Image (cartoon, rainbow, N blue to C red):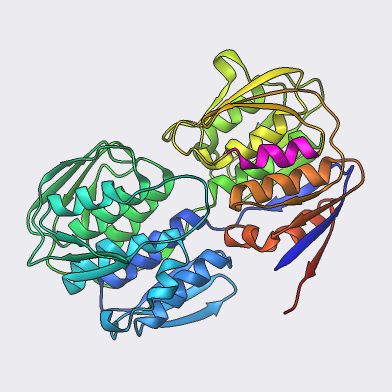
Amino acid sequence: MSRLRIQGGKKLRGRLQVAGMKNAATPILAATLLTDEPCVLRNVPRIRDVERMLDILRSLGVRVEWAGEHELKIDPRNADPAKLDRKAMRSMRSSVLFLGPMLSRFREMELPEPGGCIIGNRPLDTHLTALTAIGATCERGAEGYLLRSKGLEGRTVVLPEFSVTATENLMMAAATAKGRTTIKLAAAEPHVEDLGDFLNKMGAKISGHGTHTVVIDGVEKLHGAEHDIIPDQIEAGTFMVAAALTRGDLTIERVRPDHLDIVTQRLRAIGASVEIDTDTIRVTAPGTLTALSGANKYQSLPYPGLPTDLMAPFGVLATQCVGTSLIQEPLYEGRFGFIQELVKMGANATVCDPHRVLISGPTPLYGREIRSLDLRAGVTLLLAGILADGETVLHEAEIIDRGYERIEARFAEVGAEIIREEDHA
């Protein structure tokens, strides 16, 4: 267990580089199981979720080597499903991404209920619907699911929701299925597109990835490939909010501005200045910030809409906006746990129901002892501590390490004052 001790009242100024995307790295790591040839991945973030995915791969007998600070060499030729570490599978939500590759390569997969952040009920129904539609069978047991296949066959599959991980699982499974698979209502997020690009480098025939209709013509075999993970859209958005929140001046480097169109639009709409270059974004907040309301409310939507993973950072930003902001989270009913922690710090916020919160501002925030709760809430409360008057102690800080690499050190480089303290058993 660790905690961050934050001395607040800081304006963040300087330059920050965005790491590789967590939500792109995890499915691409799983996809390496689709071949028995080595793969090389670059721009891989050194975060806890990546390390957990690597632990699962190692448990299968996959050879994993860090060839550089952010470069991985993965040799999956000796992968053995009988060796799978079920405890490691249960430790993280992203382990569900092994369903498609394992079914494709080994024709069988026993999946324990995956873990992860407690942000609401996230059943596996969409995954199972998608995979059974192309020929898998599924049995529910006391501790999870047993999926088998005698051979996957392409079909037209209409997903019941825009599920990112179900789209990714189906793309991976269908890459070597017999015939054509068409996914309708597919998720179109940048990391889904990045997975499709990697699969095509492996020899897959996928088109339409990055749209809501994806077409996969199955091939007999995939080969090894090299790939650079895309920049993390959510980390870039977090840094953009941090600049506006602290009335700072941040130039954010190694970004894909086209992945951040709606974030840029919302920040400009409430009064922040956003300057865009080829692969950099500069954010300042020279004047009054106005509330997120009306047409400019924050409502999480499938891409290219506002990401659910940036809802919490925008929530703390709303505490510094003039007027009452409306934050809507249609999907997850547990996302608003961080609001009570913000209220402890002085925020004026009312949770209307599990999917809506009203936040009135501007209100000063004061340092308090608070808890991270989940990954995105944790980094949000870290931002609140950087802004707040006095000292904030953020407990369970290791949760933030799931998705952000060396976050306190990187914020310290642009003006934050943060010390990490570890509890030793």
Give coordinates of residue 21: x percent, y percent: 51, 55
Q: Is residue 35 visible?
A: yes
In the picture provided, is 410 more to the left or to the right than 67? right
In the picture provided, is 53 more to the left or to the right than 231? left
* Of 87 and 259, the residue lying toward us: 87
Give coordinates of residue 218: x percent, y percent: 13, 57
Q: Quadrant of the C terminus?
A: bottom right
Magenta segment includes 114: no
Does residue 90 lie above or below 238 as drawn?
below
Which residue shows up at 58% across the image and 21% down it?
A: 297
> Splitting the image into 4 quarters, where does residue 211 fall?
top left
Most distant residue in the front direction: 142
Q: Quadrant of the N terminus?
A: bottom right
Give coordinates of residue 190: x percent, y percent: 43, 45
Q: Which residues are magenta?
A: 336-344
Most distant residue in the right direction: 390
Q: Is residue 12 visible?
A: no
Give the number of marks.
0
* Of 403 and 175, the residue lying toward us: 403
Which residue shows up at 60% across the image and 48% down it?
A: 376
User: Magenta region's main secondary structure?
Assistant: helix
Most distant residue in the top direction: 294
In the picture provided, is 126 more to the left or to the right than 6? left
Does residue 166 lie above or below 408 as drawn?
above
Which residue shows up at 81% across the image and 46% down it?
A: 385
* Of 249 and 378, the residue lying toward us: 378
Give coordinates of residue 323: x percent, y percent: 73, 16
In the picture provided, is 384 more to the left or to the right than 174? right
